[in-house]
């Protein structure tokens, strides 16, 4: 009996010691405040025949057989800290409720609770030199959330990102 009580006290002490360091899950939030207003009117880049050929060639050379999602550059302005950035927000052609923010490797899905980092499941982004469009392979509609994010609506969306995360560098 004493042995079991001794073990119980040790387990309780270990639990209480670890409790301040425990977290309730993953969080991709960084330190840089980011903001985009998805309610603003915006334009998107139109994929050309040359762009489509580049995309098809990439998929063929990589031997990829899954769904391909294309993101096109928008005129939406991104606020990163105190700076306004142009050309950093892309919209998915095949899935128009999805926006990708290059500067912080952030996916915004209209109607979701949080912005998220899409870097799961082999997800990859490829862009031609123009950076006007991105070819996404192994696209997944979820990832690690930015718990600092506001809900993603057709309005102002905010999150704390990491300005150093950029897949296309």
Image (spheres, rainbow, N blue to C red):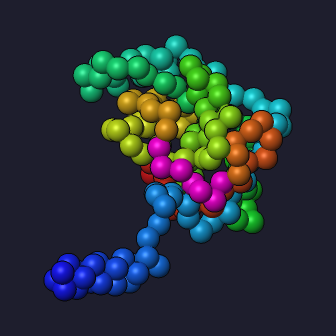
Residue sitting nearer the eye, 118 or 71: 118
Apparent side of residue 82 relative to residue 57 in the rendered image (left or right): right
The furthest residue to the right: 40
**Residue at point 74%, 39% (across, down):** 153
Q: Determine whether 64 is above or below 81 in the image.
A: above
Number of labels in the image equals 0
The furthest residue to the front: 1
Q: Could you say which quadrant of the image residue 91 lies in?
A: top right
Apparent side of residue 105 relative to residue 74 in the rendered image (left or right): left
The quadrant in which the N terminus is found is bottom left
In the rendered image, residue 28, in percent from the top left (x then y), is placed at: 51, 57
**Residue at point 83%, 37% (across, down):** 40
**Residue at point 39%, 29% (across, down):** 137
Q: Determine whether 114 is above or below 52 in the image.
A: below
**Residue at point 35%, 25% (across, down):** 58
* Residue 130 seen anywhere in this rendered image of the structure: no
Q: Determine whether 140 is above or below 28 in the image.
A: above
In the rendered image, residue 65, in percent from the top left (x then y), is placed at: 30, 18
Q: Could you say which quadrant of the image residue 3 lies in?
A: bottom left
Tell me if residue 45 is in the magenta stretch. Answer: no
Q: Determine whether 67 is above or below 109 in the image.
A: above
The furthest residue to the top: 49
Q: State which region is magenta.
A: 143-149
Apparent side of residue 146 relative to residue 119 in the rendered image (left or right): right
In the rendered image, residue 159, in percent from the top left (x then y), is placed at: 66, 56
* Residue 151 seen anywhere in this rendered image of the structure: yes
In the rendered image, residue 147, in percent from the top left (x then y), is placed at: 59, 56
């Amino acid at each position: 009996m004493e042995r079991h009580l001794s073990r119980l006290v040790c387990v309780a002490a270990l639990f209480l010691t670890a409790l301040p360091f425990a977290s309730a899950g993953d969080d991709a939030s960084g330190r840089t405040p980011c903001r985009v207003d998805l309610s603003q009117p915006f334009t998107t880049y139109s994929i050309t025949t040359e762009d489509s050929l580049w995309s098809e060639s990439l998929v063929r050379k990589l031997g990829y057989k899954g769904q391909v999602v294309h993101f096109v550059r928008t005129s939406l302005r991104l606020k990163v800290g105190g700076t306004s950035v142009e050309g950093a927000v892309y919209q998915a052609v095949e899935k128009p409720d999805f926006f990708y923010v290059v500067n912080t490797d952030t996916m915004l899905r209209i109607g979701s609770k949080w912005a998220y980092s899409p870097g799961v499941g082999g997800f990859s982004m490829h862009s031609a030199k123009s950076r006007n469009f991105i070819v996404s392979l192994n696209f997944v509609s979820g990832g690690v959330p930015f718990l600092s994010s506001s809900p993603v609506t057709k309005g102002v969306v905010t999150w704390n990102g990491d300005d150093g995360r950029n897949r296309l560098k």
